[in-house]
Image (cartoon, coloured by chain):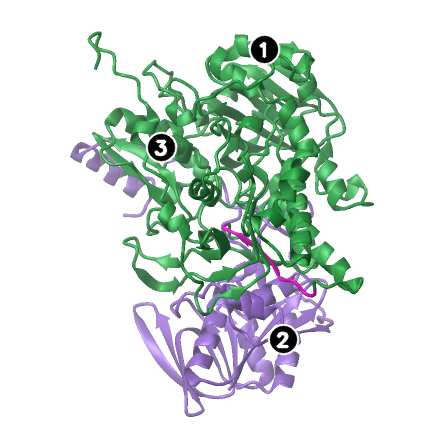
Amino acid sequence: MKIAVCIKRAADMETRFKIAPSGTSVDETGVKFDIADFDGFAVEAALQIKEKEGAGEVTVISLGADAVQETLRKALSMGADKAVHLKADAVPADALAIARVLAAELETGGYDLMLFGRMAIDAANQSVGPMAAELLGVPCVTAASQLTIANGKGTARRELEGASEVLEFPLPAVVTIDEGIARPRLPSLKGIMAAKKKPLEVKPVQAGESRVTVIKMELPPERTGGRIIGEGPDAVPELVRLLQTEAKVL
Amino acid sequence: MTSSGRPLPILPAQYQPPLPSERLIVAEPPDAEHVPMDVVFVGGGPAGLAGAIELARLAKADAEAGGSLGDIQVAVLEKAGALGEHNLSGAVVNPVAFRALFPGMPDSEFPFRAPVKAERVYFMSDRRAYRLPTPPTMRNHGHYVGSICEIVRWLGERAEAAGVNLFTGFPVASLLVEGERVIGVRTTPSGLERDGTPGSSYTPPTDLTARVTVLSEGTRGSLTQAYCGWRGIGSPNPPLFALGVKELWETTRPLDSVIHTLGWPLPNDAFGGSFLYPLGEKQIAIGIVVGLDYHAAALDVHELLQRLKLHPLVRPYLEGGEMVEWGAKTIPEGGYWAIPDRCFGDGVLIAGDAAGFVEVASLKGIHYAMQSGIFAARAIFDALKKQDTSAAALAPYDQMVKDSYITRDLYERRNMRLAFQHGGLYAGGIKAGLMTLTKGAFPGGRITAEADAEVARTAEPVPHLQPDGKLTFSKLDAVFRSGNATRDDIPSHLIVGADIPPAVADFYTHVCPAGVYERDGDRLVVSPANCVDCKATDDVGPRWTPREGGSGAKYRSM
């Protein structure tokens, strides 16, 4: 079984962001980057499938500047077998432009299963995976919280509002991964050592025209401090009144 | 209670549990699955990284010259999740060790923010600041203001490029020993439940073997303390420590000068001072450092920093700005007389803050740490060449340190800090002045010192400050700004003595800048996830031990 996982290098969401002077991007000074959250779950899902099958190969693919190699190495140290760096100056804002570059690479690999995170935690498009599936002409299941492969078929579970559904699909297929799959493993010390010797192929790519441009970024308004209305049961009527009239949540 | 009704003074040592040496020094053969290394540096700070870079380079040069050493594997183990996240310093940096490590590289390529352009020293009262002539020990012309986090990340890139194995997120739990020899290390496990049982993401410890292990673990290193205890390595004076609490501010009013202060808000019987450093045009580092041999049990270093920011000298620079990072760390202050009698042993060396290579009068340690790491690398290289890493073969390390500016500087100012434990600010200050003039000849000899935990704490009242959330902050708000996101269900890594009386619980509450300790009625409540590894209570109260990798602070620019 050949599995590909497309991963994005994204800012650690614990970071306190600042907008760059351009007004259209995040100021990256002092910001820590890592595998985007859901992409980490996708890597974990791929490794678990490979471990269960007892055979196979997991390839991690990332698009971006040289810095993404660090992210690819981390996935290799978790246990992926090889990595492909699609080298471009920047990741375009247009999800379709990203999907085209990734689909072109996925097409050449002959993969049985192609995993993505449900969405990149920074851009939150949720569309690169499905678009790549469309370009490749393969089935697509989004936001899977469980995934099993058996007899050349995949079974995925998706969490819906108030219910969940189970789907079956033939391979090859694209699946985007939600949390719910086991927490991404931490690289072991031996894994880090081994990752240094695993192949990381660099392929310069030209991302096509981006038809979507970011024109403005804004930080959310500062949260104002809480208010203490009173203490004990006497404060309840006032709390209820404020929740109704001011917060309008009741 | 005494007959006058005043509570008795607290002697911290009386309530301090012993170091858990049996966990830190383990006489077991390494696990069959161990990772074989040649040299392991425990701690990826300035000492460990400079040492690893120098060693990798010496080995490479040897291989290129057709030498006998062959390929050697050098590892740096760091407990923080990423390099720099547990490092905190002022910092005004003397670039001398950078020049030694990167000969030919211009200063402009070093990871500093800006050269020191001007500096001012003030003696403070609660409302005024009196400019003092800058003492020779505090002159910083030719030095640079920088962030130790950025310095460490930069050194890490160089180490990686030199072929060093960097393992971040791997604290060392134990030294593995055989006879008197250190043969490697064992990392901490991760993914333990609160009760210490393995959880779903459990990762077992990993053993690494090494021909030489370098303890470059920083201030109050647990392994260093345990190793010195185990081998009976003492020092003429007990080591002394200070606690530094620091904030990084984004400001609109640029600061044009490095500022140091003495006096208020510290009481006269406490040793320390404060600093304001410009990190470029838009950021200011502000911090306060207080020797942990202070007397008032209710003294609270975090609160003193909050109070300092309200002073008319300081406030105008910060008002309208934003506090973006907060952190705390102890500083080894014992100086020359507190350095271990030997910093080498069979298969082991001690470098940097772990060895106490800090010069207090000039508030500097980074270049001493780096330089000692470089010396460690050179001693190890020679020992590896001779295929002998016994104590005798590694002993030249101590001689290199003794023959260098590390010992020269520390010796010249050997008694300066100690004068303050005996004389307080005024008498201590006068003596320190004479010591500076005579380059340490006055009064000569050695002033003795008491360990911080042996200094009695009195119940004198200390005013309390109510933080406003804009300029001044509570400990919980402050810890949030350290980036600490340790999971709440982690087992406690802190060892607290039994039956802690309420007055001692209050003392711990004040010592810890991160709000780990609180008193609830007569009970001491411990929140270990708040801990930012400053090690203050390890000096005078509950013991700190290594915990799961990646826990604690995530400093970015401290």
Please state the chain letter of the residue tagged with numbered disc 1 in the rendered image: B
Residue under the image location 68 percent in, 17 percent down: B439
Provide the residue designation for mark 2. Answer: A102
Front in this rendered view, residue B101 or A136: B101
Dot 1: within a 10 Å radius of its alpha carbon, few (fewer than 14), some, or many (20 or more) residues?
many
Provide the residue designation for mark 3. Answer: B541
Q: Secondary structure at mark 3?
A: loop
Supply the letter of whichever chain is purple: A
CA separation in Å, label 2 and label 1: 71 Å
The disc at residue B431 is 1
Q: Amino acid at mark 3?
A: Gly
Which segment is the magenta one? B70-79
Residue B151 at x, y = what percent? 65, 43
Q: Colour of chain B?
A: green
Of circles 2 and 1, the one toward us is: 1
Task: Tell me, yes or no, whether the two marked residues, 3 and 2, touch with CB atoms within 8 Å.
Answer: no
Residue B541 at x, y = what percent? 35, 32
User: Is residue A235 left or right of B25 when viewed as pictured?
Assistant: left
Both on one chain, marks 3 and 2? no
User: Is residue A214 left or right of B502 when viewed as pictured?
Assistant: right
Image quadrant in which you'd find residue B531: top left
Residue B291 at x, y = what percent? 48, 24
Dot 2: within a 10 Å radius of its alpha carbon, few (fewer than 14), some, or many (20 or more) residues?
many
Q: Secondary structure at mark 2?
A: helix
Front in this rendered view, residue B216 or A111: B216
User: Is residue B201 left or right of B2 when viewed as pictured?
Assistant: right
Residue under the image location 61 percent in, 28 percent down: B359
